[in-house]
Image (cartoon, grey):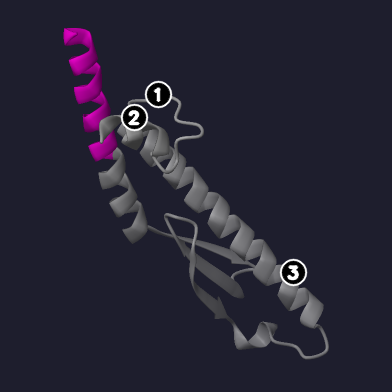
Amino acid sequence: MKNFQQMMQMGQKMQARMKEMREKLADLEVTARSGGGMVEVTANGEGEITDIQLDPEVVDPEDVEMLEDLILSAVSEAQRRADEKREEAMKEATGGLPMDGLDDLGGLSGLLG
């Protein structure tokens, strides 16, 4: 019974650390650029796009497709960087334990109340 209580306490501590990391991630910003810096996209640590900046020179009505490609490239890179930061933070919060499938803590929160 004592081992179960210790396991529950460890789970609660891990859940608290993960919550703290999620709060930090919400404040984190990552930025990616494409087209030599003509398109800049910023995302938060959750991967949500929070800002897009376009250099007026990249806005060419004759070549909208290029602008679309540059935006898509910068968005993808910003989200990839946010994913990396999120993974790093979760590894830190869980002490390196694999947490695949528990992103929303659904598996732990049911046990931990």
What residue does disc 1 label? Answer: 97
Quarter of the picture holding the N terminus: top left
Q: Residue at x 66, y 86 (%)?
A: 57
- Of badges 3 and 2, nearer the viewer stands 2
Q: CA distance from mark 1 to mark 3?
A: 37 Å
Q: 45 or 31, which lies in front?
A: 45
- Please give the label number shown on residue 94: 2
Which of the 4 image quarters holds residue 74? Answer: bottom right
Q: Which is more foreground, mark 1 or mark 3?
A: 1
- Residue carrying label 3: 69
Q: Which quarter of the rendering shows the C terminus?
A: top left
- What secondary structure is found at the residue carrying circle 2? helix
* 49, above or below 28, in the image: below
Viewed as shown, does residue 69 lie left or right of 57?
Answer: right
Question: Residue, x 66% and y 71% (percent of image)?
Answer: 71
| Numbered range of the magenta stretch | 1-17
State the residue in front, 56 or 6: 6
Q: Are marks 1 and 2 in contact (CB under 8 Å)?
A: yes
Type of residue at label 1? Leu
Instruction: Name the residue type under label 3.
Output: Asp
Asked whether residue 10 is drawn in magenta, I would say yes
CA separation in Å, label 3 and label 2: 37 Å
Amino acid type at circle 2 is Thr
**Residue plotted at (38% across, 37% down):** 90
Decide which of tag 3 and tag 2 comes sooner along the chain: 3
Residue 24 location (% of width, % of height): 29, 52
Which disc is residue 3 wearing?
none
For disc 3, the neighbor class at 10 Å (few under 14, some 14 to 19, many from 20) is few
x then y, percent, for residue 112: 27, 32
